[in-house]
Image (cartoon, helix red, strand yellow):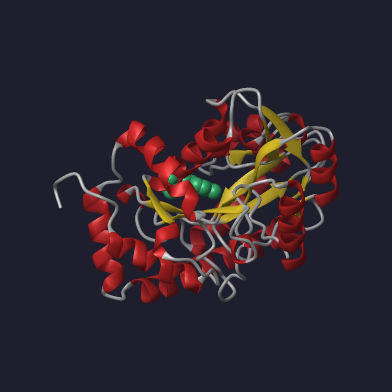
Amino acid sequence: VLQYGLPDDALKRQIAELMARRGVSCTEDQVFLTTGSQQAMDLASRLLVDPGDCVLLEQSIYDGIRMAVKARQPRVLPVATDPDEGIDLEDLEARLAGVERASFLYAMSEGHNPLGSSLAEDRKRGLVEIARRHELPIVEDDVYGLLGLDGDSPPPMRALDERWVLYLGSFSKILAPSMRVGWLVVPEDLIEPLTALKHSSDVDTSTFGQQVIARYLEQGRLPAHLDRLRAEYGRRRDAMLEALEKHFSGKARWTRPRAGIFVWLELPEGTDTTRLLEAALDEGVAFCPGEAFASMDPAPLRRSMRLSYAGSSPERIAEGVERLARVVAGNVKVAV
Ligand SMILES: Cc1ncc(COP(=O)(O)O)c(C=O)c1O
């Protein structure tokens, strides 16, 4: 356990079983273990992107992917995204029409970070159809997919296509981020190049972390843990939505997550949430300003913020939203 080691077969088997729970059929030979899903993003970028290539990122996007691709010096093509509905397929087609080739599209089908939304079935199908037609890899980040809050999440895009969708999962959001164990599900012919790239960056995924998680999964303990986690996050989500309804109704727009841990709150035009943050912290309430999630132009995201309900009790969430409403009312010209 304390030595270098090959990727743990028992863990890969367990992950293939977990994928079946997500409605994805794959073999353990298609599972590639990574040091968290952040490394999976880095490896996918190194595998797929050459300097100057085009990468498609939604306008509002998890900052970790932006950082991962940045090292490859790509041309980022921002794709319009609706906070509720997700990636705009027409805009994606228009972006693709303007370039010879794009290296990949990064997408989240469940519990989007930062938007909190999930893709409808027809949008997932539409994206996969575009990917096939343009031979465009989709890097699908599904780290919140097992955190369905209204029952099991529908299957990710990887369930629809195993050639063009490179799937990325993690134990960070369902078990323990400190273990630093994530995974990719990819076509078998990509395992060898990924192995070479990974070796140059960290040799192995922590042998210790792999074995701890493999034993935990073998003991069959994950399902009960996930049930508890999802029930608790569900209560926290409900508390946040209820408080938003009470304090922001008619004055702001927000998303209603069915998976994950985030709500995206859009305030009236002209609001600058980065400037609001200081006043909010003085009131003891924190959020992430929208512009932190811009793939390119931060201006349209300045009026928005990402709220997380993961870390506080329903009572504290209710109190936090009430305080936030006070801060907004005192600092935004349009009365809230
Ligand atoms: C959408 C998303 N993807 C990936 C990660 C990275 O997680 P890890 O590297 O711990 O698996 C995070 C962490 O916040 C995330 O929110």
Above-or-below relation of 2 to 234: above
Above-or-below relation of 45 to 10: above
Query: Residue 119's quadrant in the figure?
Result: bottom right
Residue nearest the viewer, comparing 270 with 14: 14
Residue at 61 percent across and 34 percent down: it is 292
Above-or-below relation of 7 to 334: below
> Whole-percent x and y of residue 306?
62, 46
Left or right: where 246 falls relative to 72: right
> Whole-percent x and y of residue 203?
29, 38
Residue at 77 percent across and 59 percent down: it is 126
Left or right: where 127 falls relative to 144: right
Residue nearest the viewer, comparing 328 with 189: 189
Residue nearest the viewer, comparing 51 with 116: 51
Number of labels in the image equals 0
Say if residue 85 shows up in the picture: no
Query: Residue 326's quadrant in the figure?
Result: top right
> Whole-percent x and y of residue 104?
64, 41
Residue found at the very far left of the displayed protein: 2
Say if residue 240 shows up in the picture: yes
Residue nearest the viewer, comparing 229 with 287: 229
> Whole-percent x and y of residue 187?
52, 55
Residue at 36 percent across and 71 percent down: it is 222
Above-or-below relation of 159 to 262: below
